[in-house]
């Protein structure tokens, strides 16, 4: 599966979630490519820190607004089971490119309704992409959650602007920042921490969603193949 962590807002938790998800997928013995699409290079720096500390992290490559062009990301993906894309804030052209290749777009969002309202432009980008890619799945992820009441506020507000929200949430926990600073994903940095439990629950939910999405896609292709005698696409 190709998962893009996106959203125009800065500091929403995209890189933290990308590194956490990619590392957890790697720990589940999947071959993972982590694409750093952010000119700031947060995830490349994280990977450099990992290398200096002798830590195992997924392969990291830098890509930008051309990643959707044939011969770019698709050329390297054959060697991997999963790809996680860490998008930059703002840079609409890079978000668009990621939305042209992703199976699943995850938009991390802070806990307050105001954080959710600031996602309006990002949801519009997703909706534009869905016009040409109707199978694209997109969900909000409540991130840096501090209090349940506020989290529910962001959840309701995201649904209000047309974005379904994952059941899994990442609470505000210092361990996430510590893991990033040490060049590790949280489930590797402190496997028994509540933060790691939350990332594992998140990855479980992503698997369940993409399995459902694949099933729906397969059914559609099968219907089309019956009409056209083409072959249904195989599951990833
Ligand atoms: N769940 C969390 N708990 C505690 N701190 C967090 C959490 N998620 C993110 N942070 C911290 O918030 C800051 C911003 O997070 P991060 O870099 O993941 O956001 P981003 O969306 O990638 O930012 P940018 O838009 O600049 O790329 C970092 O210092 C990170 O350690
Ligand atoms: Mg980032």
Image (spheres, rainbow, N blue to C red):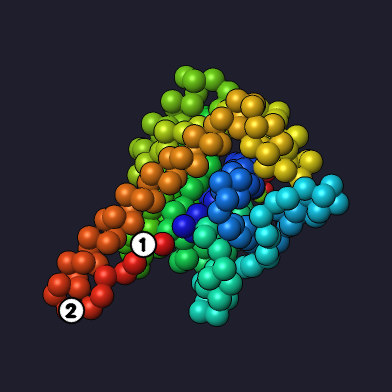
Residue at 64% x, 37% y is 187
Q: Is residue 175 left or right of residue 70?
A: right
Q: Residues within 10 Å of mark 2 (few under 14, many from 20)?
A: few
Q: Cβ–Cβ below 8 Å for labels 2 and 1? A: no
Mark 2 = which residue? 229
- Towards the viewer: 44 or 191: 191
Q: Residues within 10 Å of mark 1 (few under 14, many from 20)?
A: few
- Towards the viewer: 153 or 54: 54
Q: Residue furthest right?
A: 52
Q: Can you give x and y, in whole percent of width and height, for residue 225 in the image?
A: 20, 73
Q: Can you give x and y, in whole percent of width and height, for residue 91 in the image?
A: 60, 61
Dividing the image into 4 quarters, which one contains the C terminus? bottom left
Upstream in sequence: badge 2 or badge 1 = 2
68 versus 39 height, above or below: below
Place residue 216 in its image quadrant. Answer: bottom left
Q: Can you give x and y, in whole percent of width and height, for residue 74 in the image?
A: 52, 73
Q: Can you give x and y, in whole percent of width and height, for residue 188 in the image?
A: 68, 39
- Towards the viewer: 157 or 74: 74
Q: Residue furthest front?
A: 29
Mark 1 = which residue? 235
Residue at 74% x, 57% y is 44
- Towards the viewer: 161 or 189: 189
Q: Secondary structure at mark 2?
A: loop
Viewer can see residue 14? no
């Amino acid at each position: 599966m190709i998962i893009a962590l996106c959203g125009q807002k800065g500091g929403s938790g995209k890189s933290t979630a990308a590194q956490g998800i990619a590392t957890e997928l790697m720990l589940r013995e999947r071959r993972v490519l982590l694409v750093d699409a952010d000119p700031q290079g947060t995830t490349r720096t994280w990977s450099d820190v990992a290398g200096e500390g002798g830590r195992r992290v997924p392969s990291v490559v830098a890509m930008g607004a051309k990643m959707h062009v044939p011969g770019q990301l698709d050329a390297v993906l054959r060697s991997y089971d999963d790809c996680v894309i860490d998008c930059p804030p703002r840079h609409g052209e890079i978000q668009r490119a990621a939305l042209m290749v992703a199976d699943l777009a995850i938009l991390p969002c802070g806990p307050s309704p105001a954080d959710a309202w600031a996602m309006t432009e990002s949801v519009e980008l997703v909706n534009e992409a869905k016009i040409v890619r109707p199978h694209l799945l997109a969900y909000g992820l409540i991130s840096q959650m501090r209090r349940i009441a506020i989290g529910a506020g962001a959840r309701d507000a995201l649904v209000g602007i047309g974005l379904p929200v994952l059941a899994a949430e990442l609470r505000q926990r210092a361990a996430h920042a510590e893991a990033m600073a040490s060049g590790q994903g949280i489930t590797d940095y402190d496997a028994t921490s509540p933060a790691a439990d939350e990332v594992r629950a998140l990855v479980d939910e992503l698997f369940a969603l993409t399995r459902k999405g694949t099933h729906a896609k397969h059914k559609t292709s099968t219907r089309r193949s019956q009409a056209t005698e083409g072959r249904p696409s195989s599951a990833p």
